[in-house]
Amino acid sequence: MTLTLYKQKRAFNQTPEPIGGKAENNELSFVIQKHAASRLHYDFRLEMKGVLKSWAVPKGPSLNPADKRLAMMVEDHPYDYKNFEGIIPKGNYGAGTVIVWDEGTYTALDVAGSKAEQEKQLLKQLKAGSIKIKMTGTKLKGEFALVKIKSKDDNAWLLIKHKDRYAKETDITQKDKSVLSGKTLEKVASSSTNIYGKNAAEKATATKKVAPSKSAPVVPKKSAEKKPDLKGGVKKPFPKNIQPMLATLVDQPFDEPGWQYEIKWDGYRALAYINKGKVGLLSRNSKSFDKKFYPIHKELTSWQVNAVVDGEVVVLNNEGLASFGSLQNWRSEADGELVFYVFDILWLNGMDLTGLTLEKRRSILKDALPFSDSIRLSENFETTATEFLAAAAAMNMEGIMAKKADTVYTPGGRSRAWLKIKAQKRHEVVIGGYTVNDGSVKHFSSLLVGVHEKGGLQYIGKIGTGFSDKLQKEMLAKMKPLLAKKSPFITVPDVDKPSRFRPNPPKATVTWLKPTLVCEVSYAELTEDGVMRHPSFEGMRADKKASEVVRETTVPLEKVVKPTKAAAEKKTTNKQIVKPLNVKERKTLLNPTDETQLRKVSGHDLKFSNLSKIYWPKEKYTKRDMLNYYYQVAPYILPYLKDRPQSLNRFPNGITGKSFYQKDVTGKVPDWIDLSPYNTGDGKHKNFMVPQEDASILYMANLGAIEMNPWNSTIHKPDNPDWCLIDLDPSEKNNFDQVIETAQVTKAVLDSFGIEGFAKTSGSTGIHIYIPLGAKYSYDECQLFAKLIATMVQEELPSFTSLERMIKNRKGKLYIDYLQNRPKATLAAPYSLRPKPGATVSMPLHWDEVKRGLQMKDFTIKNAVERIAAVGDLFKPVLGKGIDLPELLNKIQG
């Protein structure tokens, strides 16, 4: 245990925080401090081995077992910190007001023994990422758990109340007084003078960033306290209408330096124009929100600044989370807490700031604006996107935003420097009609909705849930003036169509509407034909034009975020290196002079002849070179050949001579070589060759089999492939960058289902991607799975990829081949040479190598052995346990 980091962050000649302290009794202590720093949070601290293990809990503890509170682990604090209450002066780490919100003792759950024995077990739980305790405090009592969120970083946890007699649904944070002094944060801030003689209230409330919590203390102020630095801005007159900058939806979180992370607020985007006492609060399509959200407008009129700011209007529920349904029906404070979260500033005091970096604009925003209880700064969170998204999902939030710190503001543009990453599936849709089921007493049974696509309104689903009777009545009033005689959809939806969920749907009467109303829906998944499964109504979108509603598709992260040099180096440094097999280093098998040589390999005598014959004319590589390569690489390639029948592709005169395939080796190979029988269509009995050892590989190579082509299954389970594969096969019209992009999208699709794929160069023109199956499933199941993955990839890259088997039907597009997953099909093995110029090798890759600049010539007969020896067998997991295919098929197919 160390306090080094704690001490490094603090200047003790400027802050009254304690430096050390020792435990006073034989019980373990805890303290929870309410801390109004740059943002309000609660510091949850547990005594262990003389220090306080600490977590920052933004929303504070909860007594409701249904709540999962994000808790970010921070540095250890000294034992005496448990009694600290007061002011941390501005300019110091954690500046703000602190009260002791609760304190008491705790024990490790289900662990008996002394304090030392308890601590020993608690430290083991801490390391394992799951701490279970029983607390005895003034406010918190009973059982709690701290559970680490599974990610590559170590500081994101969840604080959860166990179900016991102390569990309650009431908000315990409403009890806002210190258990030591009886004071609230505001009372401490307004009445205390710190030890340096400066007013504590001024220190604690300057540039306040308020957390999304109903109980967050706020000291409103009507003017900024610090003059902002506008250097770099451009002098321009007050703008009247700025189109907001839009974000790109990506498929997964990422952890790269240079990005800032915010909550994706579930509300209405709004720009506020404040100039000379006049205020306009406008939606993204310039519709006025002045009357609809009158408290925000009124608050803005009191600002003594001239500015244009960008943000989101939301309604917060009792948990401090944005509720979109409450927002659309908001009429007064009785409907929920209305808040305008501001995240950007575009113009201030005659200066256009859009050309400044986000980091600079955020600094100006904090210094220039008088935030209050109803107008708050949208917080930046000091975490990783992976952790933040996991926490957002745990709290049922819509998602997160990632913004590049050095980006400028691009009005009206959908930027790839601003990214949205969703924790829930949501979509804006246009209402094109509604249905009423026979016998229904509802105002309507479902909404028929669509998106603009391919020159018209494309049907995307039928929404039958999420409405109250009152809401239906209000919506029907809006729809009545829009009645139409014809369907607005490109293809008229069959509303009575059976499905696996409703095999006998009720008869329904359809009323068509002019497609002008927009609403938002949540849904489980999309079917193959793009229709939402299990959609639920979330609310009307008064801020969107129907013409703007198009199908929103995720962009693969790899197409948007390019790792920085530092991050790439770190990733390369930290990536797992598979240790080479434990075999003695192999020199060459054959000497460089004798034309014919006899060697004993794996206990068998082999005769090698014509060793100087040129196999690769341009490079002058010989048959001897090829045999020496296979001898050196045999321990690595053998696992992918052993017990697998071979189709020999023989080049007896090198790559420029005539070649032929040989399947049947009956009577043509030594007795020690294993065979696998098969019958031809005319009833003849024949045999495949089946390698079992190094000698088998060299025997095949000596026949001129430059490449090794194994089955996907073994003779032991011929109907059950060990792997599923996707073969990316480009045409002459494709460049290799398109192959790389397709591979990256394939990985993104696999990642979205939690599937680990393994890539290798084909050694020819493409890339092969393998997914381990563990020989547990049939070829039909394997091919179905591969087809589903290939289809999703092709839908992401329709301009240059194809699933057409016939070459003439591909029209020059890259072929995503899933049909290789069939009995007796063969593909070049990992580490196999290829009969191509340069003597290229089919080489397994780290995924961070699958990027622009990769070339087939990077891996050849001359450098492959050295690379393999350095990184080991990267493909080894392909022969492992394998995925749960039925579960994945159900997930993908819905």
Image (spheres, rainbow, N blue to C red):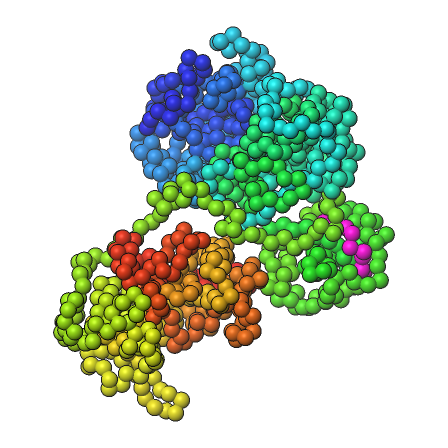
The location of residue 477, given as percent across then percent down, is 83, 49
Residue 116 magenta-drawn?
Answer: no
- Can you say which quadrant of the picture contains the C terminus? bottom right
Which residue is at the front of the view, 208 or 480? 208
Q: Residue at x 16, y 66 (%)?
A: 592
Q: Is residue 785 above or below residue 141?
A: below
At a point 33% along the width and 64% down the height, the residue shown is: 838
Task: Look at the image and give the residue range highlighted in magenta.
Answer: 511-519
Where in the figure is residue 646, as x and y percent of width and height?
Answer: 32, 76
In the rendered structure, the answer to whether residue 444 lies left or right of residue 108 reads: right
- Can you see residue 559? yes
Residue at the farthest right position: 481
Closest to the observer: 387 or 98? 387
Quarter residue 228 falls in: top right
Q: Position of residue 291 (x, y in %)?
A: 79, 34
Q: How many marks?
A: 0
